Amino acid sequence: MKDVPLTLDKVSELKYVPQYPDVKTYVNVFGNLFQWEADDWQSASLSWKESCYIHAGISGAEVTIKGPDAQALVSMSAINDCYKWRLNFGKHLVMCDENGLISSHALVNRTAEDTFVMSAGNPWPWLKLLNTGKYQAEPIFGDIYVFQCAGPKSLTCIEDFLQADLHDLKCLETRTITVPGLGIETLVQRIGMSGTLSYELRGPAQDGPAVYDAFYQVGKARYDMKRLGWRTYFVNHTEGGYPQTSCSFSQACDIDPDFIASGMNLLPPVYTGSYDPANARARLRTPGEVGWSWMAKFDHDFVGRAAVEAEAAAPKRTIVTLEWNDEDVADIYNSQFRYGEPYKYMELPCSPQQPAGGNADRVLSKEGREIGVASASVYSKYFRKFICQCTIDVDQADIGNEVVLEWGDFGGIIKKVRARVERYPYLDLVRNEKYDMDTVPHGFKK
C-alpha cells in the first residue's frame, strides 16, 4: 500500500519532507523539525549494509561565498589545498581556530571560478574572515533540502528514480538532473557518511517534500528503502569512521565570544559524560585527533597553521574504535533492575541520544592513567556490539589494546567498562571511493 503524506495545513511543520501518518516522533535540530524515527531503528541500522536509506536530517542552511577573493578567503579558512579544485567537485574542508582546534568542517562545492557553496556546515570561519574587511567577496544564504541515500542499492535506486545513468559519477562530483514527473532539478553528488556506497540529492527547500516522497515511493517499492531518522543516523558515523561536530565533538567556535554574541549558535553543546563539564578541551578536537592531519597542506597560510603543523610533526593522539565488553554493557542494563542507584542509562542505538557533541567520557589505561576521550557511543545492530569513537594517545592505539572507559556523568555513579581498541573505521565493507561500479546494477538503461 502506498504511503500517502497528510495534507492538513496545521500538521505540516516539516519543511523538507512530507508528514507521513505512520511517523510518530520528531526532533527539533538547528531550529528545524525532522523525523526522529520513521522506519524502526533496527531495520534502519541495517539499511546501508543490505539495501539503502533516505535521510533528510541535515537539510537546512546553504552558504555561498562569491567574489574575486572568494578562493583566497576559503583557502585562509581551511587546512586543505583549495587551489587544485575542479569545477563541480566538492572537498571536505577542515577549518580551525588560532589554536589549531576544529572550529567547523563541511562539504564545500566549487560551482564556478569565484563561487564556493557550503551545505550542512557552520560558516562561522568564513564570516569571521569576511568581517576583517580584507576580502572582496559576499555571502549568499539559501535554504535547501539534503537527502542522503546510502547502501548497496542506493545508486540503482537513484538511477531508477531520476531515469539517468550515473555510474560514471566520481566521488565528490556533482551533476544536475531534472526529476521526471516533477519538472524540477536536483543536484546529485557521490558523497555520504555511511562508509558504503552513498549519494546526496540537493535542491531548494520548497521542492523537498515532493522530491522526498517521489524518491521514497520508488525506493520502498523496489529497493527496500528505509527512512532513516535522527535516532539512528549517527550509527553510520561511528561505524563508518566519520567524526562529526554535534556528534563526536564540539566546535571550537562554541567558546569563541564573537560566535556566542553573534546568535548563530543554534545548538549550544551540553557537556555530559564522565569528564568534568568545566573541561571544555575534552570536548574539542584537533585535526590529528580525528585522523585528518593528512588533509593539511602547508603550502599556504591558514588560520591555526602553526598549531596544526606542530601537531602533524609530532602527533600525540589519534582516533580508534573502542569495542565495549558485552558483560559490562549487560551490567549497565541489569543495574536498572537492582535496588540502589543504577548506572547511567544507555539509550539505543545512540547513547546519549544525538546530537550530543558535548558528551565526553574518560578513557584510562588498565593501570588507571588517563589516555583518551570517548564519544559517539552506539549499538551496532549489524555487528551486535556496542562501540564508540575514541581519541587516544598514539602509544595506546594498537588494535587489541585493552582500556577502561568510564561510563556515567561527572559527579555521579560511574561504571568502569572494559573495552578493546579495534579497527578504524569499524565497518569492514567496501568504501564509497573504492566501489567497483561494474558490480552495481543499473537502474536506468538508455
Image (cartoon, rainbow, N blue to C red):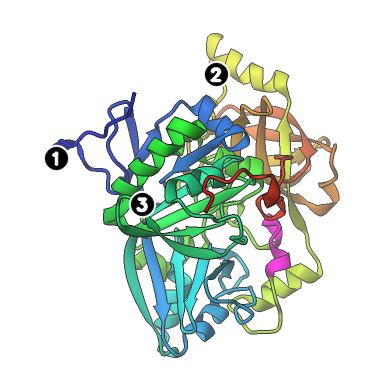
Using the image, determine if residue 81 lies above or below residue 408.
below
Q: Label 2 belongs to which residue? A: 342
- 31 displayed left or right of 295: left
Task: Give me the residue at 52% from left, 78% from top.
Answer: 74
Where disc 2 sits, the SS reads loop
Which residues fall within the magenta stretch? Answer: 288-295
Q: Amino acid at mark 1?
A: Asp
Q: Quadrant of residue 134 in the image?
A: bottom left
Q: Which sits earlier in the primary sequence, circle 3 or circle 1? A: 1
> Residue 180, which numbered label?
3
Q: Amino acid at mark 2?
A: Pro
Counting from the top left corner in percent of width and height, residue 121 is at 46, 61
Counting from the top left corner in percent of width and height, residue 110 is at 50, 74
Q: Label 1 belongs to which residue? A: 9
Q: Quadrant of residue 22 in the image?
A: top left
Where disc 3 sits, the SS reads loop
Mark 2 or 1: the one toward you: 1
Q: Which sits earlier in the primary sequence, circle 2 or circle 3? A: 3
Q: Which sits earlier in the primary sequence, circle 2 or circle 1? A: 1
Camera-nearest residue between 134 and 423 = 423
Task: Give me the residue at 83% from left, 46% from top.
Answer: 396
Do the numbered discs 3 and 1 sit on residues whose CB atoms are within 8 Å?
Answer: no
- Find out whether residue 289 is within the magenta segment: yes
Do we see residue 271 in this rendering? Answer: no
The span from disc 2 to disc 1 (Cα, nearest Å) is 45 Å
- Outermost residue toward the front? 446
- 320 displayed left or right of 29: right
Where disc 1 sits, the SS reads helix
Mark 2 or 3: the one toward you: 3
Camera-nearest residue between 406 and 136 = 136
Q: Quadrant of residue 178 in the image?
A: bottom left
- Find out whether residue 343 is within the magenta segment: no
